[in-house]
Amino acid sequence: MSDKLDILIFGAHADDAEIGMGGTIAKHTAQGVKVGICDLTYAEMSSNGTVETRMEEANEAASLLGLTVRTNLGLPDRGLSATRGHIERITQEIRTYQPRIVFAPYWQDRHPDHIACSELIQEAVFNAKLRKYLPDSEPVNVEHLYFYFINDVYEADIMVNVTEWHAQKLAALSAYRSQFITGQGTVATPLNQGYVERVEARDRLMGQKRMITYAEGFVSKLPYVVDRFD
């Protein structure tokens, strides 16, 4: 299938994936890996920016990161829940793109939508492989489900060295001017009060554990398998 992706990343809102793993995305696309992002909502409840503005910013960020595709399911912002309809929409997205690897937000975060998104993706990844679930579409067995951090960082199982691609991550985040930059008509939020600088600092801190300039951390609920210890 021409739509098939190697990696599919889910976020509740445009900018979630860039915050948590923008460097990892850039690193993989630079190596020819087909990466896509699916935003669950249009972030219509955001304090700053409009739906139209945020869509333009998301498309700009997608171009900067070299994404193969970026989609939006149009689910309700601040209304995500593990309902049958929401799970079915996400399951169909997984079956459409048949990714080998899926990323979801870590299941603990200060934003309830990020927590809800994490739960929904876990449900959908499980259901995607069931041949009797939505039998009109082909089942897909996702090989790996990993979790990335957005607002709150916990102990990582895996880290990716993104030093060479961190400037690209910051450029992608800079595309979200309505969220991270103050201006006329904007209101103060945690995102426009030095948020990007704190993301940069935490990526430095993550990398410090292994003497890496910048790193992004991830969690897996299953043991990480290696062929041998090097």
Image (cartoon, helix red, strand yellow):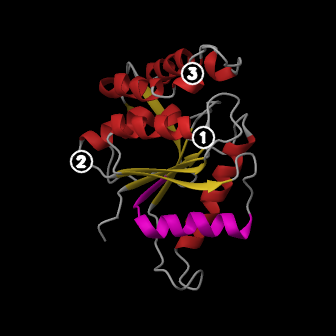
Q: Nearer the viewer, mark 3 or mark 1?
A: 1
* Residue, disc 1: 51
Q: Position of residue 170 (x, y in %)?
A: 42, 23
* Residue, disc 2: 32
Q: Residue drawn at (32%, 50%), measured in percent from left and top?
A: 228
102 on left or right of 182: left
Residue 169: quarter of image:
top left
Residue 155: quarter of image:
top right
Q: Position of residue 50 (x, y in %)?
A: 62, 35
Q: Residue drawn at (43%, 40%), measured in percent from left and top?
A: 59
Q: Position of residue 43 (x, y in %)?
A: 64, 41
Start-end of magenta stretch: 83-102
Nearer-N-terminus badge (2/3): 2
- Name the quadrant of the C terminus: top left
> Which secondary structure lies at badge 2?
loop
Q: CA distance from mark 2 to mark 3?
A: 30 Å
